[in-house]
Amino acid sequence: MKFIIGNWKSNGDIDKKDSMIKSLKSVKTNNKVILCMPFHLLGGGNSVVEIGAQDISLYPNGAYTGDISGQMLKESNVKYVIVGHSERRKYHNETNEIVRKKSENAIANGIIPIICIGESETDKKAGRTMSVVKKMLLDSIPKQGDFIVAYEPCWAIGTGVIPTTNEISAVHETLFKALSKIGRDTTPILYGGSVNPTNASEIMSINNVHGVLVGGASLKYDTFLPIINAAK
Ligand code: 13P
């Protein structure tokens, strides 16, 4: 079973969500399909697709204007939440420590965090990819509880440029080994960044790639369906 997770980011509306959920209803798949929606579209889903969230407050309920707490996500039937996406790290200054605390907050509310990590273009050019992703991983994961890791190189997000098969394989092996060392070898490790109907099958056949996190191509049924079907 692979994870096919869509991230709608700040996109979508009620009509688009309804139409996507309706279209996916008749899809036959053994894979885990999740669409992480903006907050106003949480809830719903069906036997094929679950609705997840894209962020969680660092804090419990209280005087934190604009924040959506773990308890609120739980009440919206959310079982998965993306944390530490590179866009949140970049535009909202989220550090590994914040990401770890958010992950722990999710777990405390029975929600599985999808923890995003990935090197910048500068890191890659400087040959620092492995050390950067390993540190991000170990500093961002919760002390206990189940989680999912998504490796998303920042330079591959929304650019149409993806790492080579060998590069993805090498990073996922490094992450798998780091997780194994701390007794977390069953943690799913997903790849994200410019996944599309053409490259999805090859990416998901790479060793230690347990699924994909899809941005742009998850917004339309015509591009999301072939990605779901590409997962063996
Ligand atoms: P794209 O698939 O649009 O490159 O986005 C990837 C992403 O950021 C998913 O979280």
Image (spheres, helix red, strand yellow):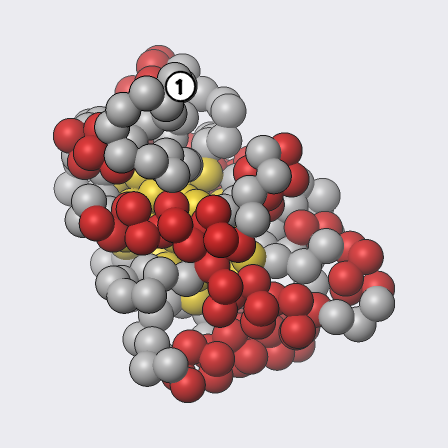
> Quarter of the image containing the C terminus?
bottom left
Q: Is residue 6 above or below residue 113?
A: above
Q: Is residue 19 visible?
A: no
Q: Is residue 73 above or below residue 230?
A: above
Q: Is residue 61 visible?
A: yes
Picture quadrant where residue 76 is located: top left
- Which secondary structure, mark 1? loop
Does 216 sit left or right of 132 as displayed? left
Name the residue type under label 1: Gly
Q: Is mark 1 within 8 Å of ligand 1?
A: no
Picture quadrant where residue 72 is located: top left
Residue at image location 53% in from the left, 80% down from the top: 173
Q: Is residue 22 above or below residue 135?
A: above
Residue at image location 66% in from the left, 74% down from the top: 130
Q: Which residue is mark 1?
A: 66
Residue at image location 81% in from the left, 57% down from the top: 122
The tally of labels here is: 1
Does 59 sit left or right of 84 as displayed? left
Q: Position of residue 131 (x, y in %)?
A: 66, 73
Q: Position of residue 92 (x, y in %)?
A: 58, 34
> Quarter of the image containing the N terminus?
bottom left
209 or 58, which lies in front?
A: 58
Does 176 sit left or right of 18 as displayed? right
39 or 219, which lies in front?
A: 39
Near mark 1 (Cα within 10 A), the count class, few <14, some 14-19 or many ≥20, is few
Q: Is residue 71 above or below residue 99?
A: above
Picture quadrant where residue 44 is located: top left
Q: Position of residue 48 (x, y in %)?
A: 22, 43
Q: Position of residue 129 (x, y in %)?
A: 70, 69
Residue at image location 38% in from the left, 30% down from the top: 37
